[in-house]
Amino acid sequence: MTSAIALARLVALIALGAIGTKLILAGREPVSRRLILAGALTALAATAVQVLLQAALASGDAGLTWALLETFLARTWGGRVALVRLALIAAIIAAGPRSARVALALVVAALLTAPIGGHAGTAAPAVVSFTFHALHAAAAGLWIGGLLVLAVQAFAGRDDAALRSGLTDFSPWALGLVMIAIAAGIGAAMLQVERWAALFGTAYGQLLLAKIFLLLLPALLAAAWLRQRFLAGNGAEGTARRVLIVEALFGLGVMMLGVSIAQTVPGRHDAIDWPFAFRFAPEIVWKQEGGMQDILVTLTGGTASLILAGILFAKGGVFRQAAALCGAVGVALFGMLAYIVSVPAWPTTFAATSEPYTADVIMRGRRVFLENCVVCHGKAGHGDGPGAGALPIAPADLTAPHTEDHTAGDMFWWIGNGMPSGAMPGVGDAIADEDKWALITYIRALSSGYSGRDVQKRVIPRSPWLGAIDFNYQTGTGENATLNDWRGQVVVLLVLIRDSAQVPRVKELLAMAPDLAKARTQILIVSSESLGEALGTLPDNATLIETDTGTILDAWSLYRRTFWDMDSEDERPAPPYMEFLIDRFGYVRLRGRSDDETLAPASLLALQAAYLAEEPQSRPPPDEHVH
Amino acid sequence: MRVRLLFAFCVALTATTAGQALAHSKLKSSIPANNSTVAGGFKEARFDFLEPIEPAMSYFTLVDANEGPVLRAEGARSCEAKTCRFAVEPLKPGKYRIDYHILSADGHVVEGKIRFTVKAAQ
């Protein structure tokens, strides 16, 4: 059904584009009413079919009914935009034949609305996205519509004079339209693809590459045609005719890819299936032994060679050969640089996790870890399990910062397929994909816990990096809420208590609740015991979460490690009391632990919360883009 | 002839590529989570999506282990922006599945299912 939608979209765009260019070029010969009517009716029918198919698809198992069609048109964004477009096209039929100017304005307006109901609506920033998508569709529609009209004329073999004057009139417009379409298209593509990896590794990106390739062909053809026209004199009409037809067909191909792209999940949302065995990662190679020197030497050498080649070339004469040699050396050095900064990659290297960074997932990942990984990697993940000694290659220390050099997708591949060095066998399908991701999420939380030792009882301004572990809980009224619900609104003071002996500290904090409320800070108290009576009535900005499973407390315990008490063998019981300040963007900024460090005075904590409530955002929220 | 071939190729290309549109789900997280076990006191289901959705054309169906329908929640009453939540009457212990059908704001239909188990309340 999506293919039919794409085809309907294509027909509507071309029909509108064709009357649009006819009207633009109306100076010499007035556009016949019949042509406007025929084009507008075709566009109307195609758009109506497109809307019906979209509504049917959106209706799901219920099937399309009148009531659902009405709902679709009246209450969804895509439906409302489609109604506007239908109205604009209907207006062309009503008013178009009387005034060419009104008709043209309506055609352009209808073309501009074409992409608004689709992908354009969800890419941010919205105004920029709408502008890019709308201009791209309108310019492309007019260009290809016009091209096809001329191609049909050429194909039908109408008299040469008319064709030539049509071409002469259309050419400057075509150039402008193509420029607009390409520029706006690049902008829209950047918004929808976001990452280079998505350009090569998603259906959307690959369609885009195919489209760019097809677009380059007409450009080459146009160049060939110009050569013919200017070099071969007037005898080249036949060639020009053929070139025009072929170019129009390529244009049609480009547009078909375009409407297919409009129906494909944008690259930024799709799973990336990386097609190459390598990827460029200078930031990783830079940190490796000798990596920095290698990069600097090849980069400097390559750049110097190319500059020298340029200078020599400019001198001309006998220097040209030397310039060619220098240029070749420069290109070779850049090739070498590309080789140096590439690291191995696998199909899943850029795959995004299916599992969010939550307490539930982390604890599920921990169970997978304990069942499958301990023999080699050890209970605490240091690569020192009972079986590690017998292995020719030492198992990785999963708590070390180098885990950051590998993408989650790399780890996913290794868990399933083994390490290429043979250091680790793959589990294949013995662990389900979502459990592999959960395992990776656990390893990330474990590793972050070690790096997180430098988050202490003072907030370091503007340096967020440790992502808070999300969890869900039930509010007093039984609704499901999550820690992340507070994101973007307030600072959260998260209190984790396992021992009722720590109740006085909680009361001390609750006494500061009015100050914390002024600092837009919400207090969440997670307890393994029932504390309701001990704490009495809670202020408005405090919630008590009495969890029976302990998942939240256990997951957050991964963030317990301090420089004084690393507990690297995971031997000691979890701390009886911890408190964290989480900034408005989801980063842990302060940590206090009752048994290891003196806790900050409650008043100082409130001051720091007040600072965080005002601190501007310095990086995007963690895990904003989980798939 | 060649022109016709090219045209056929283009149509085939459009048809095959456009058909992939529904391949991926955009569910970010759910309560209950997929493959999770929840206590009998579970009262409300919640789904968070990556992008805003169209409530009017979205719905959820909850079925038991025998595919017997338990409830159908309409998005119009359950969803706002990126989040949908709907009340669930107390469920008997057993296995359940929630199928979701979402029209995302960019016009794509997203369908998927999550499975969960309800254990006896303690």
Image (cartoon, rainbow, N blue to C red):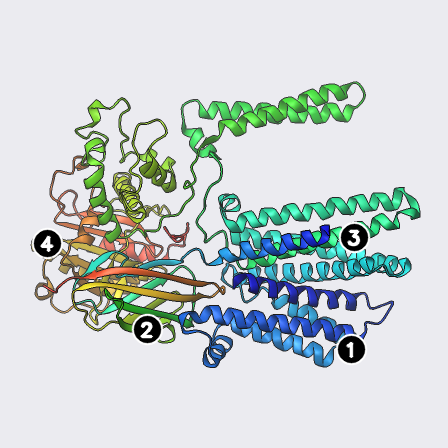
Disc 1/disc 3 C-alpha distance (Å): 30 Å
* CB atoms of marks 3 and 4 within 8 Å: no
Q: Is residue A265 visible?
A: no
Three-letter amino acid code of the residue under disc 4: Gln
Q: Position of residue A609 (x, y in %)?
A: 29, 56
Question: Which chain letter matches label 4?
Answer: A
Classify 10 Å Cα crowding around label 2: few (below 14), some (14-19), many (20 and above).
some
Nearer the observer, disc 2 or disc 4? 2
* CB atoms of marks 3 and 2 within 8 Å: no
| Front one among A534 and A168 | A168
Residue at 49 percent of width and 36 percent of height: A276
- Would you name the residue on which mark 4 appears? A502
Label number found at residue B73: 2
- Would you name the residue on which mark 3 appears? A244
Residue A173 is left or right of residue A504, and the answer is right
Furthest toward the right, the residue is A234
Residue at 13 percent of width and 60 percent of height: A507
Residue B90 is left or right of residue A204, and the answer is left
- Would you name the residue on which mark 1 appears? A99
Residue at 76 percent of width and 19 percent of height: A319
